Image (cartoon, rainbow, N blue to C red):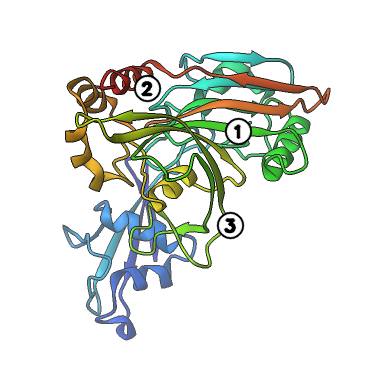
Amino acid sequence: MQGSSTNGAERRKVTVEGSEGSARIDRVLAAHLADLSRSRLKALILAGSVSIGAAPIRDPAYHVSRGDTIIIDVPEAADPTPQGEDIALDVVYEDDDIIVIDKPAGLVVHPAAGHATGTLVNALIAHCGDSLSGIGGVKRPGIVHRLDKDTSGLMVAAKNDRAHQSLTAQFADHGRTGEMRRGYLAFAWGVPNRPRGTIDAPIDRNPHTPQKMTVYVGGRKAVTHYEVRETFNGQDGKPVASMLACRLETGRTHQIRVHLTHIGHPLMGDAAYGPHFKSKANQLGPQGRSALAVLNRQALHAYLLVLEHPRTGDVLRWESPLPEDLLLLKEALEAAL
C-alpha cells in the first residue's frame, strides 16, 4: 500500500494480490486499511472516492481482479469540535449552572450526520462560551436530554460538570424518587377510549426501517402516561382528533410518537409514524385542513419542565405556551365545533 497527498486529501493505493482476486472491494480495502472502519470505507466507496483506473467504483460489493490497483482518496478529517454560531435562542432561565431554552421546531439539538452546523449546540457555544459542561463529549457540550428536530419546547443544558451530573441523574430517575417532570402537549388523531391511561410497551429500532423506532418485544422498557385535555370534532360532528397531555416515565427515542401510534392515535403531522392517517384530514373543517397543511411537522410540544436545581436543590418549574403553529392548529380544530 502506498500513500500520498492531493487536494487536501490523502491518496492511497492498494494492489490486489493473487489470493484476493474476485473478492469484494470493500473486504479487500478493509484487509489493507485497518485504520479505516468498514463504515468509513463504505462511505468513501459510495461517495465515489474509490477508483480502479480512471473509473470510480461506487458499489461496495464490486468484485476486483488480481493485479488491480485501487485508488482511495481519503479526505482530511474534519475538526469534530462544534463552533459557536449566532443563532437566536429563546432563553427562559439562566444562571451559573444551567440554561433553560424554549427550542423552536426545526432546530437540531446537536451536530450529527447531515447536520454539522446550525444546531442548538452551536447556538449554546456562542451564547455560553466555554462554560458548558464537557461530560457529553465534544459534539454535545452541556446536553443532558434531547428533543426531536421538529418537536418544540423546553430544554435544559448544563453549564458545568457538577450540574451535568445532577441533571443526568434526575433525567435517569424520571421523577420516580425526585421532583423532575417533563410534560408534552400532543395533538393526536382520534380520541383514546379512556380519559387517562398509561402506555407500557418496550421500544427498539425498527428492524426493517432502522431510522425509525417501534414497539418491539425484547426492546427497552418505555412508559408514557397520557390525559385527554380536549377533543375536536370533524365536519360530521364526530370526534376526529384530541389534545393530550403526556408525561414520560422513561426517555426513549421518539417515545411519545411511537407509543401513540401503537395505540392507534398517531400525532397529527407526523410523516414518519402517521402517514396512513393522512386521509383523516378530509374529516376536518376547512380551517383545520389549512392549519394542518402548513404545520409541516409532528404536533408535539414540550410544555412543562420541573427539576431540582443542581446547586441549591430548589424545585424549579417552567411552562411554555403553545407556539404559533400549534396554537393556530388548536384554534382551527376548535372552529369546527
The residue where tag 2 is placed is 326
**Which is more N-terminal, label 3 or label 1?**
1
Q: Is residue 221 above or below residue 260?
A: below
Tag 1 secondary structure:
strand
The residue where tag 1 is placed is 182
Residue at (38, 33) in percent of width and height:
242
The part of the image, by quadrant, that contains residue 29 is bottom left
Badge 3: how crowded within 10 Å, few (<14), some, or many (20+)? some
Tag 2 secondary structure:
helix
Amino acid tagged 1: Arg
Q: Horizontally, is 172 left or right of 302 in the view?
A: right
Residue 195 rendering spot, x and y as whole percentages = 49, 39
Q: CA distance from mark 1 to mark 2?
A: 19 Å
Contact between marks 1 and 3 (CB within 8 A): the answer is no
Tag 3 secondary structure:
loop
Residue at (62, 27) in percent of width and height:
305
* Residue located farthest toward the front when viewing the structure as drawn: 237
Residue 292 rendering spot, x and y as whole percentages = 26, 27
Residue at (30, 45) in percent of width and height:
274
Amino acid tagged 2: Leu
Badge 1: how crowded within 10 Å, few (<14), some, or many (20+)? many
* Residue located farthest toward the right when viewing the structure as drawn: 312
- As drawn, the label of residue 221 is 3
Amino acid tagged 3: Lys
Residue at (50, 37) in percent of width and height:
79
Q: Is residue 263 above or below residue 219?
A: above
**Which is more N-terminal, label 2 or label 1?**
1
- As drawn, the label of residue 78 is none
